[in-house]
Image: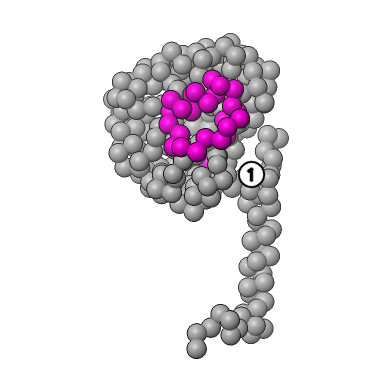
């Protein structure tokens, strides 16, 4: 498959999936890591409301605010040259009414420079997806395990197995104009059938290889959070141990006087 070197837009993102290319997505929350991921060639970067847990140390995504999402989204978008940048709409920034949702999505687009927004829900958010689309703002939907519905679903990490409901939600989001859908914690056979039934890409997290692409939380796949070990997560590096070793080496060299040496001192 030919590597895409130009800026990835929403139409190109969909075309890549239609041509059979598996899509790659990672979450990032700041300028530094967004730049690393973009340079490495990831297709899309999601500024996820998971920053509530990953960056802020909270137990759910519910506390994160629209202003915080915009703050992080702007940093990420400023670093990215190639990847499609998508910003999550946080809890209660779109649930009140479609009018509220359009206003929130508009702020994200104007103040971050992102390419699209993402919201959780399928059928129950179809009118909201349609309204944001009428404002010419691209929307990615999210069905299956929805972290913003953690209280209703009974906790994080609950695999969603109601195939008919999942399919209804995915189709409703597609019909409303979503350009892609995240499938979270869905059995792989169900996710594959949903993907086959849609004309838009699906991005899986804990949903198997049958999706159009995959997403992981950047710090998790880099091994920065050793306490988070769900079944779907593969750690591609062990940066926490490397960073710990580096900090310990720094402490030792400062204390024994070997840093700074002549090479790292001005004369």
| Residue 226 in view | no
Residue 203 quadrant: top right
Residue pictured at 46% horizontal, 40% vertical: 82
On screen, residue 245 above or below 267: above
The residue at the point 64 percent across, 44 percent down is 221
Q: Horizontal placement of 218 versus 97: left or right? A: right
* Labels in figure, total: 1
Q: Position of residue 194 (x, y in %)?
A: 59, 15
Closest to the observer, 60 or 85: 85
> How dense is the environment of label 1, judged by Cα within 10 Å: few (below 14), some, or many (20 and up)?
some
Image quarter of residue 108: top left
- Can residue 45 be seen in this snapshot? yes
Residue in view at x 55 percent, y 39 percent: 42
19 part of magenta stretch? yes
The answer to which of 54 and 243 lies nearer the viewer is: 243
The residue where tag 1 is placed is 221
Q: As drawn, which residue projects farthest toward the front?
A: 2
Residue 12 image offset from top left, x and y in percent: 46, 27
């Amino acid at each position: 498959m030919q590597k895409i070197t130009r800026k990835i837009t929403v139409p190109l993102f969909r075309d890549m999936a239609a041509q059979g290319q598996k899509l790659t997505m990672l979450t990032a929350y700041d300028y530094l890591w967004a730049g690393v991921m973009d340079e490495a060639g990831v297709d899309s970067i999601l500024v996820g409301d998971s920053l509530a847990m990953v960056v802020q140390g909270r137990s759910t995504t519910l506390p994160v605010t629209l202003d915080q999402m915009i703050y992080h989204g702007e940093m990420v978008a400023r670093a990215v040259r190639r990847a499609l940048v998508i910003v999550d709409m946080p809890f209660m920034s779109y649930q009140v009414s479609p009018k509220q949702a359009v206003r929130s999505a508009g702020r994200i687009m104007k103040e971050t420079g992102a390419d699209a927004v993402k919201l959780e829900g399928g059928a129950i958010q179809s009118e909201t997806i349609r309204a944001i689309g009428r404002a010419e703002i691209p929307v990615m939907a999210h069905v299956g395990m929805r972290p913003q519905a953690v209280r209703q679903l009974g906790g994080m990490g609950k695999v969603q197995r109601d195939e008919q409901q999942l399919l209804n939600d995915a189709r409703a989001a597609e019909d409303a104009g979503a350009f892609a859908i995240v499938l979270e914690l869905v059995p792989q056979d169900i996710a594959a059938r949903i993907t086959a039934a849609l004309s838009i890409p699906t991005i899986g997290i804990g949903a198997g290889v049958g999706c159009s692409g995959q997403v992981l939380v950047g710090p998790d796949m880099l091994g920065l959070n050793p306490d988070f070990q769900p079944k779907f997560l593969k750690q591609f590096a062990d940066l926490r141990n490397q960073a710990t070793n580096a900090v310990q080496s720094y402490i030792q060299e400062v204390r024994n006087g070997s840093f700074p040496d002549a090479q790292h001192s001005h004369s």
